[in-house]
Image: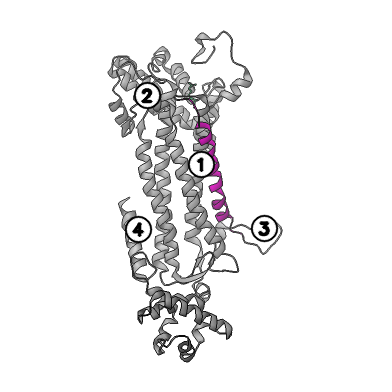
Amino acid sequence: EEGKLWGGRFLTGSAKIMDQLNFSIAYDRKLWREDLDGSIGYAGALGKVGLLSKEEEKKIVDGLSQVEFLVFSFCRHLAGTDPIVESQIKTEWENGSFPISPSDEDIHTANERRLTELVGDVGRKLHVGRSRNDQVATDMRLWLKSHCQEVKKELLTLIKVSVTRAQDEIDVLMPGYTHLQRAQPIRWSHWLLSHAWAFWDDVARLKEMVDRILVMPLGSGALAGNPFAINRKELAESLGFSHISPNSIQAVGNRDFILEYLWWSSLVGVHLSRWAEDLILFSTQEFGIVKLDDAFSTGSSLMPQKKNPDSLEILRGKAGRFFGNLTSLYISVKGLPMAYNKDLQDDKIAMMDTAENLLKLLPVASGTLQSLKIDSNRAYSLLSPDMLATDLAYYLVRKKVPFREAHGISGKVVAMAEQKGKSITTLTVEELQSVCPKFDQDVKSVWDYGWSVEQYTAYGGTSRVSVEQQIQQLDSLLRKE
Ligand code: ARG
């Protein structure tokens, strides 16, 4: 069939409506660079086993580089970034040398067609022993590898912004919540770092994931392997892979690396959404702890006074979309017979949608955090005496009262204060002693939020030394990246 790679056994062409469904060029053209790089590497491997002469190999590699330039220009043209290239592409459109033609089924087909147009019949030798099955899996792994590098940088920036604020604003105290009820006083920095550590764990997981992405499927053919004894180890090294797939069927039939990426990014989405939710809450007038910068807020078309935390809401919402992409591929893969099936073609839609969105979210998260203002007086004013009830129990523990008993006594003090319409901090020592004789004048030292947080000196706590320890630790982890 005209223009197709597989027309030999077909008597008639495919239906137009079939082509519209079947063609993936609309989205897999984003794999152009990886597809060309993979082919350049493969031409080298074919040269080494004598399937291409030195001269043929050079012709193909030069041709692929030329295609690379054309497709690159095309992509820049689509992105509308370069007017010079744009006019060049317009000329290409006019003189018919534009790289992507309507008969191109996918990026692999398009590149091979264009190569053959440029270098002649020798281009038809490139695909020997290769299938689009091992080709597409290779391309996607390379694509995901470079995406992961970018996404890692953005995560590190977000962590850095959190750590810098934690350092600068270490004196700010605020209420800590459990069940969204006031629990105990904490440092704002401790809250900041609680999220920064989650993002750091994401970076750590990313690194392990990338090692699993860097398994090269190329040389697996359609499913049975490569019959021309190409050196896969060498090929993998030349393409920047760390490992080669050990089984050709699994190499072309599995999309675990994409599922893992989609799971990983869903988890990042969850972390971002919880972080965003905290900040949305803190930015309400009721809390009033933080003020978002205008640059990351939007207004209402109806209510002139509104300033909405849209940046954070988009961040919170996208996690749902990431799960959607994960779920959609999971369900497509479930129950598929082993080796390649066309069901898999849509894997790219899920992968690229999540990847592109994640790369938009992370800089907005960093920008929102970097530019917001913390109202330390307001945060402090939200602290309330009842949040010191735990410390009151610890006071008694330090006077050798068993904790369970101390907890009960402190609870009784809270109840008594409530009954008298007072706060626990304004009860007299005599009133306290009526509940437990162990109370003494020194109980006044408990009525101090600063003192409260400073008790938590054990590793991981909210005292200044513990928070500084966290800052140093994250700082040195970031430095090593
Ligand atoms: N466009 C296809 C995909 O992304 C490439 C692999 C096609 N292989 C095949 N045997 N039809 O899945």
- Which residue carries the number 2 mark? 248
Residue lying at 63% horizontally and 21% vertically, measured from the top left: 17
- Which residue carries the number 1 mark? 354
Name above or below for residue 392 compared with residue 478. below
- Which residue carries the number 4 mark? 474
Task: Pinpoint residue 142: horizontal percent, then vertical percent.
Answer: 40, 34
Q: Nearer the viewer, mark 3 or mark 1?
A: 1
- Give the residues drawn in magenta, as a range: 308-337
> Distance of mark 1 from mark 4, alpha carbons?
27 Å
Badge 3 element: loop
Query: N-terminal of the two: label 4 or label 3?
Result: 3
> Are dots 2 and 3 in contact, CB under 8 Å?
no
Identify which amino acid the numbered label 3 is placed on: Ser
- Which residue carries the number 3 mark? 300
User: Is 283 left, or right, of 216 in this rendering?
Assistant: right
Task: Pinpoint residue 157: horizontal percent, then vertical percent.
Answer: 41, 53
